[in-house]
Image (cartoon, rainbow, N blue to C red):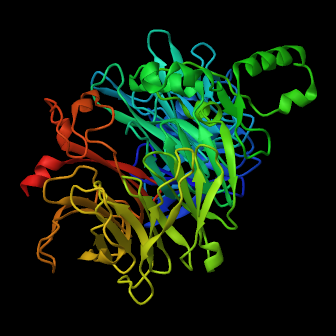
Amino acid sequence: MMDVALSILPGSNVPVLACGGDDTNVHLYVENEKELKKVLTLQGHEDWVRGISWTCIGEELLLASCSQDATIRVWRLWAKSQSSACAGDDDKIKMKEEVFNVKESDMCYAVSLETVLLGHEGWVYGIHWHPPTYTGDELKQPLSLLSASMDQTMVLWSPDKESGQWVEKVRVGEVGENTMGFLGCQMSPDGSMMLAHAYHGALHLWSKDQDKEEWKPTVVTSGHFDEVQDLSWDPEGDFIITVSSDQTARLFSPWRSKDSKEVTWHEVSRPQIHGYNIQCLAMVGRFQFVSGADEKVLRVFQAPLNFVNNFANISGFSVEELMTSDNRASLPEGASTPALGLSNKAVYQGDLAVKAEQAASQADRISDQYKEPDFHPRNITEPPPEDYLHQNTRWPEIQKLYGHGFEMFCLASDRARTVVASACKATKAEHASVLLWSTRTWRQLQTLSYHTLTVTQLAFSPDSQLLLAVARDRTWSLWRRNQPESESEEPGFSLYTQTGKDTTLHERIIWSCDWSPDSRYFATSSRDKTVIVWGPCRELESRDLMQADKIKCCSVLSVGDSATAVAFCPVVHTDRYLLAVGLECGRVELHSWTPGAPAGGQDWSRCGETDHSQSHTAAVKRLRWRPRPGRAGHQNDKCASVNGEKGGQSETGESCRVQLASASADRSVKIFSVNTRTLQQQ
């Protein structure tokens, strides 16, 4: 059985159950002696029945069924005794009636085919009756039926006022390259909005413009449909980019509609749609990032001009604030992906004109009827719908980086955005090396070898002088940047200090690591349910590094569950650090650590944790603090202080707020707002 629907027989309290399944029939079951007994089988569909839905019209029931044969059938059910008065109407064409008796109520019921709705070209997966509405104090059922199909359209059906025949009133749908259509649909209680969901989890919403009597796509939430593996804020903290096992990279930013003061987050771009699961990313500029997937290749992407213009419209920034005119002049207009390709190809303004001419001159060629949709620039002022996201918001790929022998696992870039470090899955020491890349030439700079198993995370210190690597072999290694002999020389790193199998304090795999904002300490989190802070790496208020043998364990925090993610808050208080810890159970905890306090737990204090409704339902994969205080989308946070430096204080207290983004295996991304003033009082 593919779907079931329950209702009450007219004039009784007897439940009737309709079931549709892979035998192409609709079966009716009625309660008899406290059991559901089959009373009728309605035949007519020629393929699997995918959807069933009841509605009540006066003293009658209407049952709609949809099928993979691309048709919808509407059946009418009524009490036979109540309609006997109309039996003598010879001018009306009568449909074949199926009759059954109900012992519980001593009544006879009849079922006949009301209509067959033809209009979809693909499997019809979902149907939904218009919800009943109140007219004054009376509840009435509008005769409207919504259907969703794999042909990527939704149709609203209702009887014609003059003829009474069911006809198509509204048709909405997608024109993008989504290969799968809609799996279900719903109508709002007032009938002003229609919502569909697609194979990849996307929601599609249309609303009715009451003035123009037109239906148009409307802003709706979206997200990943598989595990979210990594995320990163842009350097200015205005948006985040996430990557997932659903083979997409998505960009989310805050948006405030004209009629609302509330800031909401929406997907505004889908820079990468790939053929492999994407595992990691690193920002190397405000509009440039590197991603790694299960294909052994790193790919570098840069935002096109159409995205910069649209992001300015949505976020409220000016284009000049985002990029200089010289940088914009060299950007392509957008990007498209060739058929069966993995690389996003840049599309320039001249290419658009050429394609328009070719389309006009070769419109009748058979091969052009099946070509992949091309990029079509559009000026938008609000988050785009799913079809536009999927087709027109990709970023051009500007470079491929080859060097790893297995699937990519982690990436990191320094704050100066000059070096990118990468690591892949490894079961041997020869494959567990960390590769360094220059963002200026995109050439491989160096191979750092120490670990024997997969390096699980990499992190550059905020001052870019140290690179930390943690691995599945339960050890960490610290690499120091060498001073270049000339300004043109590319940076190099050498091993500074490390833990070995006999000196490591972690008993299980180290999942995550992060640096304190002043580059003095770093933290590691492990499956052994502990978070360890190491250091100091430099003297207080000094740029000189400590001797390597003085970098020791400073404190151990037991969190009671596998610690899969850790992140230091970028806001430094006078005497303590704020640390976020993500657990395998999905909970996020906030702890403050005071250096120099007595060990044994007295140097730690728990500031808070997510409750059941806020927590993820699976392991936290990554935690990232916004790189500066304030909340993204609230423009008055520009006067906030950064890294403890004195700055202006906004009236709304934005300087006391910080944001934490989390990615989880439960397929969701969450952004938490933390009031540091409240934490200080605890």
Q: Is residue 19 visible?
A: no
Q: Quadrant of the N terminus?
A: bottom right
In the rendered image, residue 63, in percent from the top left (x then y), is placed at: 56, 41
Is 596 above or below relative to 630? below
Q: Place residue 497 in its image quadrant.
A: bottom left
Q: Residue at x 61, y 70 (%)?
A: 425
Residue at the extreme top of the image, as rendered: 211
At x 49%, y 22%, the residue is: 324
- Which sits in the foreground, 290 or 338? 290
Q: Is residue 432 left or right of residue 283?
A: right
Q: Choose top left, top right, bottom left or bottom right for residue 492.
A: bottom right
In the foreground, 128 or 281: 281
Residue lying at the far bottom in this picture: please name it: 502
Q: How many marks?
A: 0
Viewport quadrant of the C terminus: bottom left
Name, please, the residue furthest toward the front.
485
- Is residue 387 shown left or right of residue 661? right
Q: Position of residue 284 (x, y in %)?
A: 51, 44
Q: Position of residue 296 (x, y in %)?
A: 68, 61
Foreground residue among 613 and 421: 421
* Percent of width and height locating residue 19: 58, 55
Q: Residue at x 22, y 30 (%)?
A: 639
